[in-house]
C-alpha cells in the first residue's frame, strides 16, 4: 500500500489552506462531498497529499471529531487496488470495518474506512482511484 493522503480536520478550510500555503504547499483542488458532509481541499506534497476536511453540518463525523479532539490529523489514507476484494479479505480476517463495501469518495474514487480499533487508534481510509481499477 502506498500513502495516498493524510486527512486533517479543520474548522476553516481557507484559513488552513493559507497556513500550508505559507510553507509552500498550494491547494490543488477543492470539492464538497455531501455524503460525508464535508468540504475538502487537497494540498499535494512530494509523496502524498493533505486532505483538509471542514464539516458542512454539525452531524458530520468530522464535526464530531473536532468537538471531541479539536483540529488535527483525522485519518491516514492508503491507495489500493481491488478494494472490494480487499475489504472481503479483511472482514474474513476479523478486521473491524466501518465500510464493508466501497463507497464514493472525492475525485471519483471509491473509498472505505477501517475502524480505528483495528489499527491502534488510527482511522485508516483505503482509496481506489478509477484509473487503478
Ligand atoms: Zn481521506
Image (cartoon, rainbow, N blue to C red):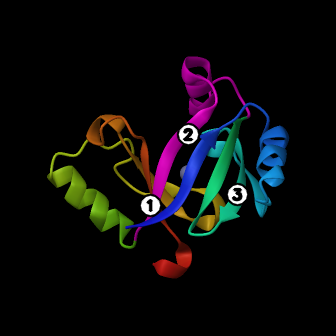
Q: Is residue 55 magenta?
A: no
Question: Could you tell me which residue is drawn at 58 percent across and 56 percent down?
Answer: 105
Q: Which residue is mark 3?
A: 42
- Residue 78 placement: quadrant: bottom left
Q: Circles 1 and 3: CB distance less than 8 Å?
A: no
Is 120 above or below relative to 95? above
Query: In the structure shown, which secondary structural element does the residue marked by tag 3 occupy?
Result: strand
**Residue 45 image position (x, y, % from top left):** 66, 64
Mark before the other along the chain sequence, 2 or 1: 2
Q: CA distance from mark 1 to mark 3?
A: 15 Å
Q: In the rendered image, which quarter contains the C terminus? A: bottom left
For the residue carrying disc 1, how many other residues have a C-alpha within 10 Å: few (<14), some (14-19), or many (20+)? some
Question: Magenta residues?
Answer: 56-80
> Which residue lies at the image location 77% right of the left edge and 53% below the top edge?
23
Of circles 3 and 2, the one toward us is: 2
Residue lying farthest left?
A: 93
Circle 2 sits on which residue? Answer: 73
Q: Residue 72 vs residue 132: left or right?
A: right
Other-residue count near label 2 (Cα within 10 Å), few / some / many at <14 / 14–19 / ≥20: some
Q: Where does label 1 land, which residue?
A: 78
> Residue 32: which disc?
none
Q: Give whichever of discs 1 and 3 has the lower sequence position.
A: 3
Local packing at callout 3 (Cα closer than 10 Å; few below 14, some 14-19, many 20+) is many
In the foreground, 97 or 14: 14
Amino acid at each position: 500500500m502506498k500513502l495516498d493522503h493524510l486527512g486533517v480536520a479543520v474548522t476553516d478550510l481557507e484559513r488552513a489552506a493559507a497556513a500550508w500555503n505559507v510553507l509552500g504547499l498550494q491547494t490543488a483542488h477543492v470539492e464538497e462531498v455531501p455524503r460525508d458532509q464535508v468540504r475538502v481541499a487537497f494540498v499535494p506534497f512530494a509523496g502524498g497529499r493533505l486532505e483538509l476536511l471542514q464539516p458542512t453540518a454539525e452531524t458530520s463525523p468530522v464535526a464530531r471529531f473536532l468537538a471531541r479532539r479539536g483540529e488535527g490529523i483525522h485519518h491516514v489514507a492508503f491507495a489500493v487496488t481491488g478494494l472490494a476484494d480487499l475489504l472481503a479479505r479483511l472482514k474474513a480476517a476479523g478486521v473491524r470495518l466501518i465500510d464493508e463495501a466501497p463507497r464514493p469518495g472525492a475525485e471519483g474514487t471509491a473509498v472505505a474506512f477501517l475502524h480505528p480499533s483495528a489499527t491502534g487508534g488510527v482511522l485508516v481510509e483505503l482509496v481506489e482511484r478509477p484509473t487503478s481499477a
